[in-house]
Amino acid sequence: MSKNYRKSKSDKPLYRHLYVQVLAAIALGALFGWLEPQAAAQDWVKALGDGFVKLIKMAIAPIIFCTVVSGVAHIEDARKVGRVGLKALVYFEIVSTFALAIGLIVGNLSQIGAGFAGKPDPSAIAKYTALAEKRGAVEFLLDIIPDSALGAFAKGDILQVLLFSLFFGFALLTLGERGRALRVIIDDVGHAMFGVIAIVMKAAPIGAFGAMAFAVAKYGSAALYSLAGLIGAFYLTAALFVVLVLGLIARATGFSIFRLLHYLRDELLIVLGTSSSESALPALMEKLQRLGCSKSVVGLVVPTGYSFNLDGTNIYMTLTTLFIAHAMGVELDLTHQATILVVAMLTSKGASGVSGAGFITLAATLSAVDPQLAPGMSLVLGVDKFMSECRALTNFVGNSVAAIVVAHWEGELDRARLDSGLARRIDASDLETAVATD
């Protein structure tokens, strides 16, 4: 990237920066939903947010395929893939346990939900309970295997695409020089897909406006007031987790969590507006590579983390489970709470970054811990949307830190690029130039 280009970027008006546009769109959307709830609750407003998320999701599967295949195929030592994967999974499990434990600690200390006056409506969550019952261990393992390679891409199932991509990458690796031309093609397709994302990102303010306006109009301020304690506790707990747990991990690795948040501010605001961490997945992978993490590590850790490293979802499940138990007057002893830790650790695996997935995993957790808690999900159904933003943000930050940490462990982190990247300002629109110059 040329010095002249960087200068022109820094000199452009503030309103032309993507993060400013998204932030303004979120504020305007919330205001519109509050002042004109009938107009904001219409399908066309909802379609603005849903449409943007669908535009992003259409590129997720091919980007993961190209990134993972390219990363594996360029590794001379096939054993490295297994080593990186093992390190990533160990990291995911340790940090996820911290997230689950923090949710339980805050829930017990605050006794959140005690004295709640609402009454659960079992019929409101029947469909979620039905979905949860299908998430047994055997069914989950079988679901990872696609019926066909094309079917995995058609459904956009991250785990299935990831599995096929690993197999394809290993197969391409064994071809040696014969597979060189195909590797080049896959690399070029990957760059083209990031170019597609750069174009789609221009519609981020529109998507954020529609998503926020519809949420406020549909659920209203009364729902927020009635469960303000849960929402506030969840946001505070997630913030503490990011600052303390992830902050200490970042410091031990040699960088500042606050500088990383600033570096990823465009993507964080997009995640906030869409309630989906997947909406910023392609941009995250690109930025982490430009931050000095090797392509192979990013290609393996980030897609895997979107299914196995869901810190925000873990905090949500333990904290919300205790809220429902307190609200319904159900006593959960240490054995029950230990069960919550184990069950939540399992049920969270495979939950994608799509908005609403956390509620389904909550249904699975409650049903496994104590069936009488399942009807209590209707108590949080009205405000789950407002907690999904925080879930997605925490998941996003957690996977960003994980990729840098694993790259550091593997000795594949360019420290100079990391320091310079976190020290300077960057805008998401740099992705267009990155694609054009790479």
Image (cartoon, grey):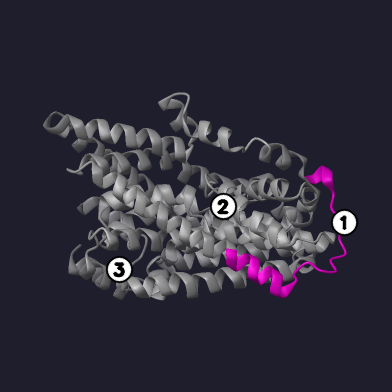
**Is residue 194 or residue 148 the one in the foreground?**
148
Quarter holding the N terminus is: bottom left
Q: Is residue 161 magenta?
A: no
**Is residue 133 or residue 15 the one in the foreground?**
133
Q: Is residue 138 left or right of residue 304?
A: right
Q: Amino acid at mark 1?
A: Lys
Q: Residue at x 31, y 51 (%)?
A: 84
Q: Residue at x 67, y 63 (%)?
A: 319
Find residue 345 and name its label: 2
Front tag of 2 and 1: 2
**Few, some or many residues within 10 Å of mark 1 (<14, 14–19, 20+):** few
Q: Residue at x 30, y 54 (%)?
A: 432
Find residue 119 and name its label: 1
Q: Is residue 58 above or below residue 91?
A: above
Residue behind mark 3: 9
Q: Secondary structure at mark 1?
A: loop
Q: Secondary structure at mark 3?
A: helix
Q: Is residue 116 visible?
A: yes
Q: CA distance from mark 3 to mark 2?
A: 44 Å
Q: Give how far across and how far down residue 352 sits, in percent.
A: 52, 46
Q: Is residue 27 visible?
A: no
